[in-house]
Amino acid sequence: MSGKINVRKIKLEDYEYIDTWWTEQCFDAPNRDILPMDGLGGIIIEKDKPIAVAYLYLTNSKMGYMDNLIADPKYVSKDRFDIIIRLMGACEKMAKESGCLEVWAMSNNRGILQRCKALGYNVSERNYAMMSWNAPLE
């Protein structure tokens, strides 16, 4: 598969790569219990090996949410951002095939935002704040 880009659903064995990407970037990997389909509800993009992954959250509405996108920090080829945009497009396609009319995501990465604008995505010009809470353990 040398040089050829492959887009596919995540498999359990992909976590050999995914977990190390989080660690190498000094982040805690999200608990698979909060990922869609226990961590298998997303898309991975690869050449000779996986490059980036994103998860698509689907609900009972016609809106999807893409989150927890992470890429191999060692993959520094010139096509890095273009591959990430292709991954986002694959998530959008998966959402539409699942009946979604809209997909949204959040990012403050300027390169990603510039490319999304160039693709005609609606991009907010404001900073964002994220609020979350955990259910108390009983």
Image: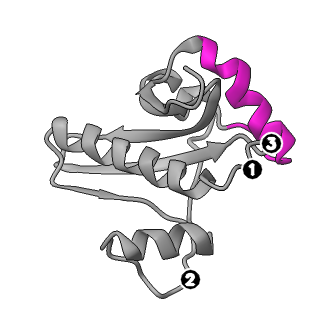
Q: Which residue is mark 2?
A: 127
Q: Quadrant where the N terminus lies?
A: top right
Q: Is residue 9 above or below residue 75?
A: above
Q: What residue lies at 56% left-to-right and 41% top-to-bottom?
A: 135
**Dot 2: within a 10 Å radius of its alpha carbon, few (fewer than 14), some, or many (20 or more) residues?**
few
Is residue 95 toward the left or the right of residue 132 in the image? left
* 80 or 62, nearer to the observer: 80
Q: Position of residue 66 (x, y in %)?
A: 42, 49
Which of the 4 image quarters holds residue 97?
A: top left
Q: Position of residue 47 (x, y in %)?
A: 58, 29
Res. 76 mark = 1
Judged from the image, the secondary structure of the residue bearing numbered disc 2 is loop
Kind of residue at badge 1:
Val
Instruction: Please determine whether, in this image, residue 71 is positioned above or below residue 44.
Output: below
Q: Which mark is residue 74?
A: 3
Secondary structure, magenta segment, majority class: helix
Kindly report the distance in space between the C-alpha atoms of the residues bearing marks 3 and 2.
28 Å
Task: Mark 1 and mark 2 in contact? Answer it, CB < 8 Å.
Answer: no
**Sequence-earlier tag: 1 or 2:** 1
Q: Residue at position x 47%, y 70% from top? A: 115
Q: How dense is the environment of label 1, judged by Cα within 10 Å: few (below 14), some, or many (20 and up)? A: few
Magenta span of residues: 13-29
Distance between mark 1 and mark 2 Cα atoms: 27 Å
**Quick check: 53 left or right of 19?**
left
- Work out whether mark 3 precedes mark 2 in sequence or the reverse, and give the earlier one: 3
